[in-house]
Image (cartoon, rainbow, N blue to C red):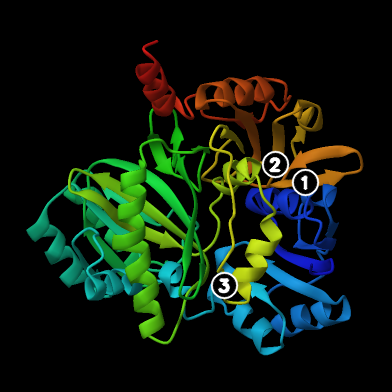
Amino acid sequence: MTEPFSILLIGSGGREHALAWAIAKSPLCARLFIAPGNPGTAQHGENRPDLPVSDHAAVAAFCKAEKVGLVVVGPEAPLVAGLVDDLQAAGIPAFGPTKAAAQLEGSKGFTKDLCAERGIPTAAFARFTELEPALAYLSARGAPIVVKADGLAAGKGVTVAETLPEAEAAVRAILDGSEGGALVIEECLFGEEASFFALCDGTRAVPIGTAQDHKRVHDGDRGPNTGGMGAYSPASIVTPAIAEAVMTRIIAPTLEGMAAKGTPFSGILYAGLMLTSEGPKLIEYNTRFGDPEAQVLMPRLTGDLVPALLAAAKGDLSGVDIGFDPHRAALTVVMAAQGYPGAVRRGTEIRGAEAAGAEGIVVFQAGTRRDGERLLADGGRVLAVTALGASVREAKDRAYAAVRRIDWPDGFFRTDIGGREVAREEAASGD
């Protein structure tokens, strides 16, 4: 039995609060540091806002001074910046992909090229760095069509254009603006979206759950894309047969392709899928736990998360069984500041967030800060109110009841999270 050790978690969002909540429960976690953390993560460990995450040498020095036995990198930006590479070079186990492997999220063009090389089902596409060829391609293809900034965009760099003028405006915003100067234009796939998560060690992949996110800011999937306004797990639309197809036709060839390039992938492979009439197709990859998907995956865990993360970091998942309760569903409702995903007002007081928690209900914090005893909003997505239930319907009812116990007049939320899944449950039960 491995002796307990110190763990450093990188990040400050709702995902990191959910990870801190799960990691702190492990008998292997002697001490948990979170850099920079938020008021929610402080409930489970020691926040270190003084540790500059972008200074990789400083992070490595901190780990050695505090005898950290595992670093868990939550957000995508430090992964793409190569934090895992520098920690590994210093002899510190780190969970997450290397800089080269993180290109699966950091460059949509890289991923599309890998799909083409390995025969991974995805939308037809073309890559552009110059305006006129991109506009000519749009004109030839017509709408609807999808325009994606090549680099990281916090879940908001995608435009599903219903008209050519909308598509042209998106192309101009990327190639004439500051979103990286490169883009991918894709055919518009039709079907239902789902998220599929696999824990990877470079050669092996272990499926660890499914979820469905709600990207649009308003009810009925209207308005601009966001980082995510809510989610639920599991996603029943990902049947065992579909899950097997995802593992064999998408995840496995991805790992094989990355290993063949000399950049094996270790960490969380989060496949955004479109379930089309031709079978599941890859929309895009993320190379870390999703947010708000982590908030519905972590409460469904039946096993210890830490040994699985450590095994992946050390490159050997053989024998690892990370279990989720098949009889429990989870649903989270994101409470955001008015104006999100645009400019938001900061500093408004939130009352009752702690009191809203109960057995099977967790209020994960993201964009918050403390002012003495007061909890204040300090970002766009502020809270993720999560509930467990025997069904998605029960989890939904419990989550929204908790939302109503929170007094925050300056916040808003969608009222239809999980609605499609509840309708499926009712149809299956004959209600």
Where, by quadrant of the figure, is residue 82 drawn?
Answer: bottom right
Please say if the residues under marks 1 and 2 sit with CB atoms less than 8 Å apart.
yes
Q: Position of residue 233 (x, y in %)?
A: 51, 38
Task: Tell me which numbered mark, 3 or 1, is placed earlier along the sequence.
Answer: 1
- 340 to 171, vertically: above or below: above
Q: Residues within 10 Å of mark 3 (few under 14, many from 20)?
A: many
Q: Position of residue 159 (x, y in %)?
A: 32, 51
Q: Give amino acid for label 1.
A: Gly
The residue located at (81%, 39%) in the rendering is 375
Element on which disc 2 rests:
strand
Q: Residues within 10 Å of mark 1 (few under 14, many from 20)?
A: many
Q: Position of residue 404 (x, y in %)?
A: 67, 20
Task: Tell me which numbered mark, 3 or 2, is placed earlier along the sequence.
Answer: 3
Q: Which residue in the protein does label 1 denote?
A: 40
- 228 to 102, vertically: above or below: above
Where, by quadrant of the figure, is residue 308 drawn?
Answer: bottom right
Please say if the residues under marks 3 and 1 sit with CB atoms less than 8 Å apart.
no
Q: Residues within 10 Å of mark 2 (few under 14, many from 20)?
A: many
Q: Which residue in the protein does label 2 denote?
A: 364
Looking at this view, name the residue that lies furthest to the right.
372
